[in-house]
């Protein structure tokens, strides 16, 4: 994928994983979640699909085929990334080299996780996903795709589609917004809100600390 | 006061909106933030790297839950070095920021979604966040809970708020009476089976109707817990006397004038009569039978007296290929009955079904029977408090005498992140929430079901309709 000239235009090479409801347990299995940092997740990506029980690559799996080496876009079945909230699924996809996923829908937590990491999720109607998949099936190797983030379009040689992306997420992708920093600019409003909230509902203030202290005192 | 009628969800969002960011997003205030050892480390690291602190530590709480071993020993030692580091790292992070912690050998340690409500931390009208998808559980008490990712955990730590994308409103009405032998687990599996694994994607679901009102709070936890398996971004049940009684029994700090104010506020937590929902579904509880999953997605579920559907008859191509793949994985045939399929393992546990009522139900079904030969049956209580209560009630000794392993609390074999992992090809009757490929161990086969059905499988060695078991003395 060439991004040197314009971060808003992605020229990618795509592989297809048509299975619907491909969950984050499969995208990044449990045994790869034991770290305290984000590193080292690429080997775990889609592990059970990529490798057999003895750890040998499954030759028939698309990402193991030599002509698909270096793909950076995934065309996926609907509800991609459903299930567990583990952000490791996103980090692992990026460490493997994926820049974008094209699908008709995504797991809701995965969606936020991806955009928070600038993994582009291009949500296109299912008919367009099917058209891209059909076109990809006729090729011996990856499907070349151009994704225009500003215009919100995905184009291949044979098909074009518009994708849904909020203005906010588009800005986050193009500019790499520091979301926490932006929210901290509301610090005064947060403090004022909290003061009002706790005055009206004192039973929610410091609820974890109050409970923990009560339990410790009783224990 | 808004003039237009509002749903309960809209009221909860409005009452926690610090700022409107744009048409789709608000800055949402968080009343309670729960953390575990495996989705929080990178959030703390990011916070420290940016030189940021935790302004409101008393609204945050952490628990070691996912990687913890559940062997029945008094002092637990995490043998796996990376997992042990996750636990010590969590303790260090909590100590540094003054965040309350339930550590590995705390007698009250347990699954986050079990310990938070059982000690009164979850109160109606709250917004509760956690780096865990089953945070939808708290809707059972009229609190808006939902799972977040690690970047968002960092955001909540730093700001006590979340940039929140608004959801749509769905109402699921369930009237009628659950028949004997069925539970909230069977109801939710039936609902997910009907509306699908994406049926509630993009929605916060409010459950209502006479069948919901009749559920205990623990049964409501089970229902709301699994709403996320239909893709829901939250689940809610308007708090009634049942829910409020549960909270007040556990939140001993709510007294006097504060109690009166809380009761007045909680009385407003319901959808207005004229409120509009974007989608609605209706179910009749009297249609519910014991439900069991046959595939590798929670919506691939069927009544125990039914037959596994024919993929060939499915109109949708993706659904068809998904069902075919699922049957290859679960080594079952289309048209086959599930009753009679042998199991090698039974797991009773998880944030879905490891509370005291679940364990009582298991003990009741087991009665004087014994775990069938060749079956390994584990009970992993949801928390130290649940475990202690079950021991005090004699449930633990009864189940141990029946051949069950009585273990320490934790997430355990629900996701098999600790050392409780199934071997390839093993088939497990499980009270958990996800039957994904490999979830309980690579190549292992999971059948989701209620605690009563899991107990019936344990004593018969095969998937069994609990309604056909004779009561024991």
Image (tube, coloured by chain):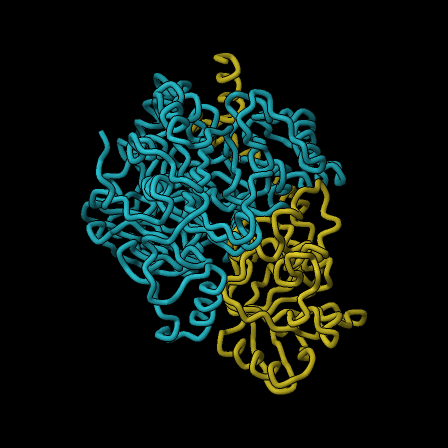
Residue shown at 75% from the left, 74% from the top:
A66
Outermost residue on the front side: it is B373
Say which of B47 and B91 sits in front: B91
Asked whether residue B441 appears in the rendered view, the answer is yes
Say which of B361 and B221 sits in front: B361
Asked whether residue B144 appears in the rendered view, the answer is no
Rendering coords of residue B415 (x, y %): 53, 45
* Displayed quadrant of residue B319: bottom left
* Displayed quadrant of residue B377: top left
Residue A36 vs A209, above or below: the answer is: below
Residue B452 vs A216, above or below: the answer is: below
Residue shown at 62% from the left, 45% from the top:
B150
Residue shown at 34% from the left, 63% from the top:
B336
* Displayed quadrant of residue A176: bottom right
Residue shown at 41% from the left, 43% from the top:
B431
Total number of numbered discs in the rendering: 0
Residue B373 vs B273, above or below: the answer is: above
Position of the N terminus of chain B, as image quadrant, is top left
Q: In the figure, is residue B412 to the left or right of A13?
A: left
Q: In the figure, is residue B159 to the left or right of A68?
A: left
Rendering coords of residue B131 (x, y %): 56, 42
Rendering coords of residue A156 (x, y %): 64, 82
Rendering coords of residue B219 (x, y %): 33, 38
Q: In the figure, is residue A109 to the left or right of B40?
A: left
Say which of B333 and B150 sits in front: B333
Position of the C terminus of chain B, as image quadrant, is top left
The cyan-tinted chain is B
The yellow-tinted chain is A
Say which of B390 and B263 sits in front: B390
């Amino acid at each position: 994928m060439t991004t040197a000239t314009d971060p808003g235009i992605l020229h990618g090479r795509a592989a297809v994983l048509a299975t619907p409801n491909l969950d984050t347990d499969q995208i990044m299995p449990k045994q790869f979640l034991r770290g305290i940092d984000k590193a080292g997740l690429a080997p775990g990506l889609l592990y059970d699909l990529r490798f057999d029980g003895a750890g040998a690559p499954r030759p028939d799996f698309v990402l193991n085929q030599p002509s698909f080496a270096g793909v950076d876009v995934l065309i996926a079945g609907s509800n991609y990334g459903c299930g567990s909230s583990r952000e490791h699924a996103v980090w692992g996809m990026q460490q493997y080299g994926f820049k974008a996923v094209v699908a008709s829908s995504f797991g809701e937590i995965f969606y936020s996780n991806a955009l928070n990491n600038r993994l582009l999720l291009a949500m296109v109607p299912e008919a367009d996903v099917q058209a891209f998949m059909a076109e990809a099936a006729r090729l011996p190797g990856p499907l070349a795709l151009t994704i225009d983030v500003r215009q919100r379009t995905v184009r291949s040689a044979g098909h074009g589609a518009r994708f849904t992306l909020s203005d906010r997420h588009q800005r986050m992708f193009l500019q790499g917004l520091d979301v926490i920093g932006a929210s901290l600019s509301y610090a005064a409003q947060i403090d004022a809100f909290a003061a009002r909230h706790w005055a009206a509902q004192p039973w929610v203030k410091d609820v974890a600390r109050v409970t923990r202290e009560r339990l410790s005192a009783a224990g | 006061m808004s003039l237009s009628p509002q749903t309960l969800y809209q009221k909860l969002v409005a009452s926690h909106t610090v700022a409107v960011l744009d048409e789709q997003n608000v800055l949402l205030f968080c009343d309670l933030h729960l953390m575990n050892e495996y989705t929080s480390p990178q959030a703390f690291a990011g916070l420290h790297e940016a030189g940021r602190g935790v302004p409101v530590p008393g609204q945050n709480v952490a628990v070691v839950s996912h990687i913890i071993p559940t062997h029945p020993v008094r002092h637990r030692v995490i043998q796996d070095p990376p997992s042990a580091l996750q636990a010590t790292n969590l303790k260090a992070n909590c100590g540094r920021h003054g965040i309350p912690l339930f550590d590995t050998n705390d007698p009250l340690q347990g699954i986050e979604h079990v310990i938070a409500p059982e000690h009164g931390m979850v109160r109606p009208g709250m917004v509760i966040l956690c780096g865990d998808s089953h945070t939808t559980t708290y809707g059972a008490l009229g609190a808006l809970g939902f799972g977040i990712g690690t970047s968002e955990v960092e955001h909540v730590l730093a700001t006590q708020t979340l940039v929140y994308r608004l959801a749509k409103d769905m109402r699921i009405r369930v009237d009628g009476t659950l028949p004997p032998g069925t539970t909230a687990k069977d109801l939710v599996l039936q609902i997910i089976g009907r509306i699908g694994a994406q049926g509630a994607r993009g929605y916060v679901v409010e459950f209502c109707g006479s069948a919901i009102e009749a559920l205990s709070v623990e049964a409501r936890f089970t229902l709301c817990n699994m709403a996320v398996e239909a893709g829901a971004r939250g689940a809610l049940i308007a708090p009634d006397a049942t829910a409020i009684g549960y909270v007040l029994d556990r939140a001993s700090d709510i007294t006097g004038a504060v109690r009166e104010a809380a009761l007045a506020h909680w009385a407003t937590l319901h959808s207005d009569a004229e409120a509009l929902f974007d989608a609605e579904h209706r179910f009749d509880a009297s249609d519910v039978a014991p439900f069991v999953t046959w595939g590798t997605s929670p919506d691939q579920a069927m009544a125990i007296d039914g037959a596994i559907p024919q993929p060939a008859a499915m109109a949708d191509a993706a659904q068809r290929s998904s069902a075919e793949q699922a049957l290859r994985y679960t080594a079952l045939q289309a048209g086959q009955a599930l009753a009679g399929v042998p199991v090698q393992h039974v797991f009773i546990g998880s944030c879905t079904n490891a509370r005291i009522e679940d364990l009582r139900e298991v003990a009741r079904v087991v009665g004087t029977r014994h775990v069938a030969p060749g079956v390994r049956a584990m009970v992993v209580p949801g928390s130290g408090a649940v475990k202690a209560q079950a021991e005090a009630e004699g449930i633990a000794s009864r189940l141990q005498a029946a051949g069950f392993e009585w273990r320490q609390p934790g997430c355990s074999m629900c996701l098999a992140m600790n050392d409780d992992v199934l071997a390839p090809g093993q088939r497990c009757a499980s009270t958990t929430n996800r039957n994904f490929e490999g979830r309980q161990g690579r190549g292992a086969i999971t059948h989701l079901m209620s605690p009563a059905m899991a107990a019936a499988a344990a004593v018969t060695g095969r998937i069994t309709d609990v309604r056909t078991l004779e009561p024991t003395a």
